[in-house]
Image (cartoon, rainbow, N blue to C red):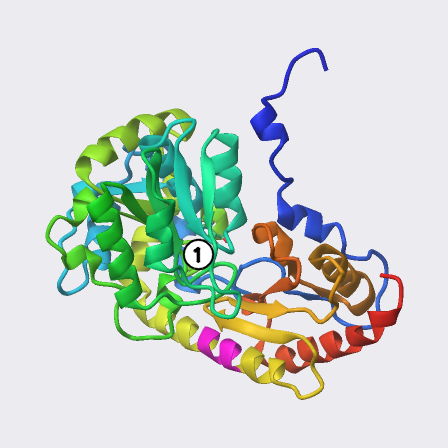
Amino acid sequence: MAYCINPAVKATITPPIAEAFSWIPQGPRERTFLNLSQAVPGYAPAEALTAHIAALAARRATSVYTDILGIPPLRSALARRMAGNDGDVAPQDVAVTAGGNQAFCLAMNAIARAGDNVIIPMPVFFNHQMWLEMMGLEARLLATDPALPLPDPEAAARLIDTRTRAIVLVSPNNPTGAVYPPALIAALYELCEAAGIALVMDETYRDFTGQPAPPHALFSRCGWRDTFIQLFSFSKSYCMTGYRVGSLIAHPRLIAEIEKLEDCVAICAPHIGQDGALYALEELDDWLAQKVELMAGRLKAIDAALAHPELAYERVTSGAFFAWVRHPFGARTAREVARALAQRHDLLVLPGSIFGPGQEHMLRLAFANAEASDMPEVAQRLIESQRDEDETL
Ligand SMILES: Cc1ncc(COP(=O)(O)O)c(C=O)c1O
């Protein structure tokens, strides 16, 4: 090529899910391949939702751009949903985005510039780190206890300097599944408030905390807009990954800056997706409650399966869509172990190493894609792989 490539983009890892998919052996196989690599619910969206979307697709009005920040009724419905009973969120605080990842990217671009840093607890959701690196921002990784990977506010405070713009949290966490206790979220919020930096919280899995109580009470705090930025996605709760709808809730002054960015990168989130998201918030509470229960059943099943006495793999944490598991192969890299699981044992999981440095002994099992009845078989394939220990992987 005669032209240059941005070195920051070139130095960033290849999208890891695509790489993991390349490990799936081709050709006939004797048993079902279990794909636990991607955090996608293994069921279809609600039929009522797809019927609604199909009807709307036939209308001319659906084919046009929306307001940059989203259709007004969706902004209002999101404000009501996130405020809950006690919170204060207004439609002007809401930007509808083309998915949760875009919400993160827009938030980072709006608050930070090259040379700034953003604190993220380890292990880190790979797309967050990738975006920061490509933008010339430092992902300042906050070490956590490998046995219980939750961020320690005091350790976070020690990482803050004059170029720090935010602490980023993901709860429930990808990849660990850990659900951050509301008191921890509150402590990190207070740290950010005192330091004059943003607390950015990716709540893509907020419906899957396993608790009926709201994940936190930050929207009830007076002055939350000065500190808190919330990100959400319709991808997981409503199985709408392909419709590309997410949201960002923040101070209206930040939303005005986000509007400039969003105008340039997408103009607006897909109109049809926004219509679907509005329908989901207004009509699918019962459907969502059933799916939350179904996922809780899958979590219980994977936890039970991973407690198998012959299993040398160790579950460290689990929750929402994920189990975070230590592999027993000492010196072997997580990538080698994951590739061997795919190629020899028909089980695709992600290597811990893509979630940041020091995670070579870890694997992420995204079990949302499997039935509860498949979980014992997942454990069996892991047990089967233990025989690989003395072979060349
Ligand atoms: C923590 C987290 N944030 C964001 C996303 C991306 O969501 P979306 O499909 O809304 O872009 C994912 C997807 O796996 C995720 O795990």
Q: Residues within 10 Å of mark 1 (few under 14, many from 20)?
A: some
Of residue 331 and residue 58, the one placed in the foreground of this image is 331
Q: Which residues are magenta?
A: 295-300
Of residue 35 and residue 229, the one placed in the foreground of this image is 229
Q: Quadrant of residue 27?
A: bottom right
* Residue kind at label 1, given as amino acid type: Thr
Q: Is residue 13 above or below residue 151?
A: above
Q: Is residue 266 above or below residue 306?
A: above
Q: Main secondary structure of the magenta part?
A: helix
- Measuring from the top left, give residue 157's x and y in whole percent: 32, 50
Give the position of the N terminus as an image quadrant.
top right
- Measuring from the top left, give residue 257's x and y in whole percent: 26, 29
Q: Is residue 147 visible?
A: yes
Which residue: 70% across, 52% down? 21
Q: Is residue 50 above or below residue 19?
A: below
Give the position of the C terminus as an image quadrant.
bottom right
Residue corresponding to mark 1: 50
Number of numbered tags placed on the structure image: 1
Which residue: 19% across, 62% down? 84
Which residue: 87% across, 70% down? 390
Look at the numbered disc 1 and give the secondary structure of its residue: helix
